[in-house]
Amino acid sequence: MKKFFLFGVSFVVIFAVFQMLSGMVLTWMYTPNVSEAWSMSGSLPQETVIVGNFSLVSLGMILASAVIAYFISSKIMQFNKNKAELPS
């Protein structure tokens, strides 16, 4: 149970870090076109609808997070096991 909890916590933290970093990179790379946005603003609908699709990049980040979390949890469990085996 301890190993599963450690894996879950490390997975959530690593996935959150990946999401924040990808958001920062996307924000950094975005260059708005103000004149085009201003000309299109009159024809935009009054309601906001958020749509999105699941991409391979998202799947890749999930898989990378899971793999890294697995290795972190296994290394911590191995370190704790070796620490417990040392003579006092």
Image (cartoon, rainbow, N blue to C red):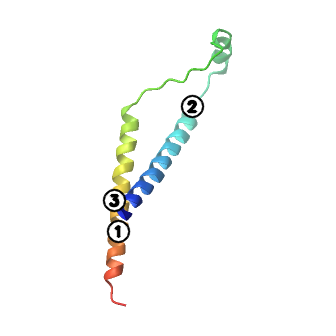
Q: Quadrant of residue 10?
A: bottom left
Tag 1: amino acid: Met
> What's the residue at 57%, 31% (across, down)?
30
Residue 77: assigned label: 1
**Residue designated by label 3:** 71
- Quadrant where the N terminus sits is bottom left
As helix, strand or loop, the secondary structure at mark 3 comes to helix
> What's the residue at 56%, 20% (across, down)?
49
Q: Is residue 79 left or right of residue 51?
A: left
Tag 2: amino acid: Tyr
Label 2: few (<14), some (14–19) or many (≥20) C-alpha neighbours in 10 Å: few
How far is disc 1 from disc 3 in space, using C-alphas?
10 Å
- Quadrant where the C terminus sits is bottom left
> What's the residue at 37%, 54% (across, down)?
68
Looking at this rendering, what residue extends furthest in the bottom direction? 88
Q: Nearer the viewer, residue 9 or 60?
A: 9
Residue 30: assigned label: 2
Tag 3: amino acid: Phe
Q: Earlier in the sequence, mark 1 or mark 3?
A: 3
Q: Earlier in the sequence, mark 2 or mark 3?
A: 2
As helix, strand or loop, the secondary structure at mark 2 comes to loop
How far is disc 1 from disc 2 in space, using C-alphas?
42 Å
As helix, strand or loop, the secondary structure at mark 1 comes to helix
| Residue 79 location (% of width, % of height) | 35, 73
Q: Is residue 32 left or right of residue 86?
A: right
Looking at this rendering, what residue extends furthest in the front direction? 1
Q: Earlier in the sequence, mark 1 or mark 2?
A: 2
| Residue 13 location (% of width, % of height) | 48, 53
Disc nearest the viewer among 1 and 2: 1
Disc nearest the viewer among 2 and 3: 3
Disc nearest the viewer among 1 and 3: 1
